[in-house]
Image: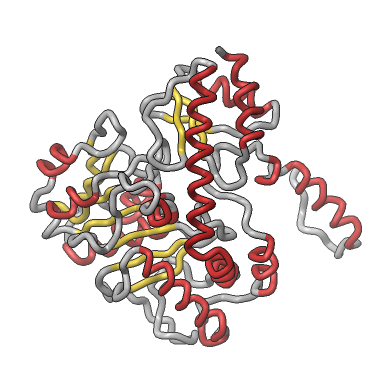
Amino acid sequence: MAEDFPEEGKDPDELMEKISKAENRDMKFSSGRIFGSMCTEPLRISKEIYSRFIETNLGNPGLYRGTAELEKEVHDAVGSLIHADDAESLSLGGGTEGNIIALWRAREKTGKRKVILPESAHFSFEKACSLLDMKPEYIPLREDQTVDVDVLEKKIDEDTAAVVSIAGTTEHGAVDPIEKIAPLTDDVHFHVDAAFGGFVIPFLRDRYAQLPDLDFQIEGVDSIILDPHKMGISPVPLGLFYSREDEGLTIDSPYLTGDGQKSLRGTRASASIPAFWTTLNHLGKEGYRDIVSRCMENTYYTVSKMKEIGFEPIVEPTLNIASFEHDEPLKIIGEMEERDWNISRTVKPTGLRFVIMPHVRRENIDRVVEELSKWK
C-alpha cells in the first residue's frame, strides 16, 4: 500500500530503523556476490571525501570554486591518459549522457541523422536516437564480437552523421578496431564509447601489448566517453566526455554563475568529482595497473574454473569480462538470485556474463563456480 506524504515529522530513531531495514536488503559489493555490475566499491577515503562535498553543484560553478578547480585537475589527469591535452572536456552523469551528447553534436554539426553503430552498442544509443530523431543502422559482429569493419565501411554514405565504436562492450568486453575505423570517417563524427574500457586499456598497455589503442592519438577520433564510476573506482555517478573540438553547443544560463551549460543536466550533484580526484591521486598509475592486472588475472581464473565444470567461453576475454555459452541463462540467473548471487547474461549469443571487478576475489569465484556446477 502506498504511503501518503507525512503530515508531521517522524522521530529520527524511527526513520533510522526503516532506513536500516532498506539498507540491509541491498546487495553490497563487499559481499563478493555481485558478478553482474560494472561498478564497484569506492575506496574508503573516497567515500569520506564524497560526504564532505555532498552539497556541491557545478551547474552553478561560481559558488564552488574549489570543486571546480578539482574538476579541471581531474579532466587534465584523465585527459593525459588518452592524449586529450587540447580537447574540450565535460563532467557528466555517465556513459549514457555522453553518448547522447556525442550524437547531438554529430547531428548539429552535419545536419544529418544516420548513425552507424555495432550490434554490440550499449542500449543508451537507442535512447539517444529516439530523443534526437536519428536513425540507427546496426552493423553485424565478427566471431570475436567486434564490429565487422568491411560491412561498416560500405554503410557510410552521404546521409551519415556519426559512426560509433565500442572500447569494452557491455556483454563481452570486446574492443572494436578503432584504428581501422577512424580512417573511414573523414566526413562524419566518430565517437568512441569507452565507458568501461577507458579505465582498463590505458593501465594494461604495458603488460598486455596486444590491446588496441582507443584515444586521440588516432587521427579521426572526434569524441570519447569514459566512466570513472566503473573501473575508475569512483562513487557514482561520474562520466568524463572529451571532444577534439568545442562544438559550441552551449545553453545560456543567465541567472547562474559560469558561461552557460553544455551537459544535459542543469543541477549536477558533484561530490563524485573531489571523491574521484582523491582516488586517482591516492592510487596513481601504478595503483591502477595493479588493480586492473589483478582483475584480469581473476578473469582468466574464472574462465579456467568455469571450463572445469563444462561452461565454454563465448570469446576469450580482452578485458575483465567473461561470458559463457548457455541456452537458458535467465533460469540460472533467477535461481542464483534466490541464493543471493548476482550474475548477468548475454543476449547475442545467449549465455552467462561475469564482470570481474576489483571487489571480486578468488574465494568469491570458487564459491560461485561451486554453485553453478549444479547446472552441469
Q: Nearer the viewer, residue 119 or 321?
A: 321
Q: Residue at x 88, y 62 (%)?
A: 12
Q: Could you say where residue 70 lies in the image, as x and y percent from the top left?
A: 52, 78
Q: Could you say where residue 170 lies in the image, as x and y percent from the top left?
A: 42, 41
Left or right of 26: which side holds 111? Answer: left
Residue 177, located in which quarter of the rendered image? top left
Q: Nearer the viewer, residue 124 or 113?
A: 124
Position above or below: 313 against 152: above
Left or right of 201: which side holds 328? Answer: right
Q: Residue furthest top?
A: 376
Q: Residue furthest front?
A: 207
Residue 195 in view in this figure: yes
Residue 338, located in which quarter of the rendered image? top right
Q: Could you say where residue 56 lies in the image, as x and y percent from the top left?
A: 60, 76
Position above or below: 358 against 77: above
Q: Residue at x 46, y 57 (%)?
A: 227
Quarter of the C terminus within the rendering: top right
Q: Could you say where residue 113 lies in the image, as x and y percent from the top left?
A: 20, 54
Q: Residue at x 62, y 57 (%)?
A: 42
Position above or below: 360 against 347: below
Q: Residue at x 26, y 69 (%)?
A: 244
Q: Nearer the viewer, residue 362 or 112?
A: 362
Left or right of 220: which side holds 13? Answer: right
